[in-house]
Image: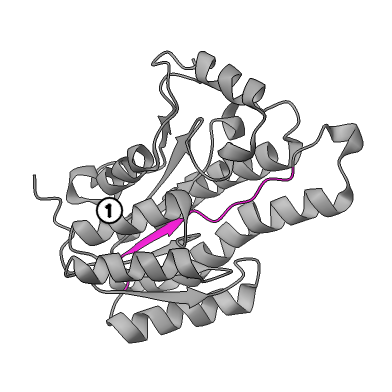
Amino acid sequence: MDLELRGHVALVTGGGRGIGAAIGRALAREGCDVALVDRELGADSNALLEAIAAGGGRAKAWSADVTDYARAEVVVREVRAHFGRLDVLVCCAGITKDGVTWKMSEADWDAVVAVNLKGTFNYCHAAAAGFKEQQHGKIVLIASINGLRGKFGQANYAAAKAGGIALAKTLAKELGRYQVNVNVVAPGLVDTEMTKQLPKEAYDKAVLETVLGRAASVDDVADSVLFLVSARGKHITGEVLKVDGGQYI
């Protein structure tokens, strides 16, 4: 099925590894030029750029801390200058610093909210005016089912992801008249380097919560993003797509 993405340009924050890297690979496979943004560019991001090039795609990486408001403006401007356009924004950058509320430090609260919520706002803000002017665009924010249900020991993460969901719904209302679609993908447990750090008991418990009995792969999440940013998702906006194997229910 042709998703009609060939020739489009996509920017993915947190694109150097994990879910973000899988999204970048998937977009490139469908013919997008891909701008990858990550705080630390290294072997993983270089390997991804090489893999995309080997497949005949075009990709370039930008080093940036997503919490830097001014840097987001510069990156979006440079992406447009380098590729000649920008059609898709996927905000995937995120961190965790877990702890129960009464033990959570101010620094851990601030760090998670800064990356997961402010960082998302920074890139939405930087891209929105251009999408509005060109009268088209697709934005997908990567949230979490924990932003919908809360999670013991994740007050900062759940609050930031809930804020991202509210941000997406607001953007959908503000940008809809300009033919810009804004949606959220909310994964449950996903096999990534981050979740490999979980205690085995916590990981196994999360798997048991799913009705499919398994964690998602990064490609499961990437495929859902592809649908939302493609022509097949053109009449979907302001929605939250749970990609969780039934973990939420």
For label 1, the residue is: 26
Q: Main secondary structure of the magenta part?
A: loop
Q: Is residue 81 above or below residue 2?
A: below
Judge whether residue 33 can be spotted in this image.
no
Q: How many marks?
A: 1
Q: Quadrant of the N terminus?
A: top left
Mark 1, secondary structure of its residue: helix
Residue at horizontal 75 percent and vertical 39 percent from the top: 98
The residue located at (22%, 51%) in the rendering is 230
**Colour treatment of the image:** one colour
Q: Is residue 99 above or below residue 118?
A: above
Percent coordinates x, y for residue 111 in the rendering: 75, 56
Q: Where on the picture, by quarter, is residue 236?
A: top left
Asked if the stretch drawn in magenta spans residue 91, the answer is yes
Bin the neighbour count of mark 1 within 10 Å (Cα to Cα): few under 14, some 14-19, many 20 and up.
some
Query: Is 30 placed left or right of 141 in the picture?
Result: left
Q: Is residue 136 left or right of residue 187?
A: left
| In front of the other: 239 or 201 | 201
Q: Nearer the viewer, residue 196 or 142?
A: 196
Location of residue 217 in the rendering, given as x and y in whole percent from the top left corner: 39, 36
How far from the left and from the top, in percent, is residue 4?
A: 13, 56
In this view of the protein, can residue 220 be seen by the observer? yes
User: Which residue occupies the extreme left position in the image?
Assistant: 1
Instruction: Using the image, determine if residue 4 lies above or below residue 153.
Output: below
What residue appears at the point 44 percent right and 82 percent down from the top-left corner? 77
Q: Residue at x 45, y 61 (%)?
A: 15
Say which amino acid is labelled 1.
Ala
Residue 64 position (above or below residue 155): below
Which span is picked out in magenta? 86-97
